[in-house]
Amino acid sequence: MPRRRNWRRRDIIKAAAGGLAAWALPSSLSAQAAPLTRIAFGACAEQNKPQPIWTPILAQRPDLFIFLGDNIYADTRDPDVMAAKYRQLGAQPGFQRLRGETPILATWDDHDYGENDAGADYPLKRISKEIFLDFFDEPPGTERRRREGGIYMAKLFGPLGRRVQIILLDTRYDRSPLLRVDWLSALARRARSIGPYLPDLAASARMLSEPQWLWLETQLRMPADVRILCSSTPMFMDLTAWESWANMPGERARLQRLIAATGAAGLVVISGDIHRAELSRSPTQAPYFLWELTSSGLTKNTPYTAPNANRVGAPYHGRNFGIIEIQWDRPDPAVILRAHSDTGMPVISKTLALSDLRPA
């Protein structure tokens, strides 16, 4: 489609969000700074609805907030519409407080990428990338802006011995098409609230591009004590009917092999997308049991519970946000994964010793 005449104008986004330079991560938050002890995260924030959940999030006094995608619901091929929806998010009072008090990192999912369940074939992905990076105030000339591929990035916080690595994947920009059932089966599945997807065993099925895989290997080899791997869609949920890494089991197996090959210790996974909170564990201990906390959504929730043989405990269906608390002062430091309701009450909790998050 032809470009709209004003989509490149960064002042569309800057004026809308009211001085987004305040969002930039302070220079003090570097690998030499004080270690992170509390990280908040969430996904699925409808920009046109009230967002009272920022009050209990800020009450946690997080050192950092991570957006896991569906940060707006754009669902458009019109860049001006997309920019306008970011303006709505930027105008939310609670969100303005968050950006004024807490550093922010972000990746995207399908609805802020551009279309429901979209992947590499979304035609406006380059424009969408620029609008996203402008809104989250990515400085000019960074690797994230220069690369041809997606918005994946990583950042280190704290000194060695208490170093946290945040790895944000891009599961949209180069993801291959999903394998679907036929239309008649899809209709029957929909009547049972089951999605249309099947596991794709083809060698060509991919969640990440080859450049992103090479980049990820480099990141996993960097020295860090705790690694937070951020995926917009669930990684260890075993249901393939909806979007998840289970739709491309070869890619999930590749990830586990890569973690083993790099010896990357201290890794936990966080994800969003599914409009509920739940805790999952990898079905195999390769290279060690990998734990995933899914938190979704900040404004959206669903009563539907999808089958998930890898789920640990019960899911939570109300609006929610996630917290990662790191207790460095223990003899064996601990990573605590928690989901909180929109009133701030913990609804899911799992404590992991760092000694359990390393290859045997």
Image: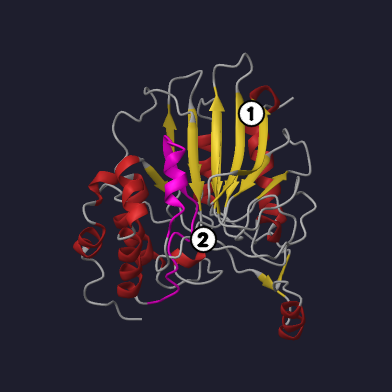
Q: Which residue is mark 2?
A: 172
Q: Quadrant of the C terminus?
A: top right
> Where in the figure is residue 150, as x and y percent of width and height?
44, 55
Q: Is residue 58 magenta?
A: yes
Q: Residue at x 60, y 16 (%)?
A: 330
Disc 2 crowd rating (10 Å Cα; few below 14, some 14-19, many 20+) is: many
Q: Looking at the image, which is closer to me, 209 or 28?
A: 28
Query: Where residue 298 sits in the image (x, y, percent)?
Result: 50, 56
Residue at x 30% of width, y 64% of height: 87
For the residues labelled 2 and 1, the Cα–Cα distance comes to: 27 Å
How did the renderer colour the structure? secondary structure
In this picture, is 167 found above or below 84? Answer: above
* Foreground residue among 170 and 70: 70
The quarter of the picture where residue 195 lies is: bottom right
Secondary structure mainly formed by the magenta segment: loop
Q: Residue at x 43, y 67 (%)?
A: 49
Which residue has dot 1 on it?
263
- Start-end of magenta stretch: 51-77
Q: State left or right for residue 355 relative to residue 172.
A: right
Q: Residue furthest bottom?
A: 184
Q: Nearer the viewer, mark 2 or mark 1?
A: 2
**Left or right: 256 with respect to 86?**
right
Residue 113 among those drawn in magenta: no
Point 24% across, 62% down: residue? 16
What secondary structure is marked by label 1?
loop
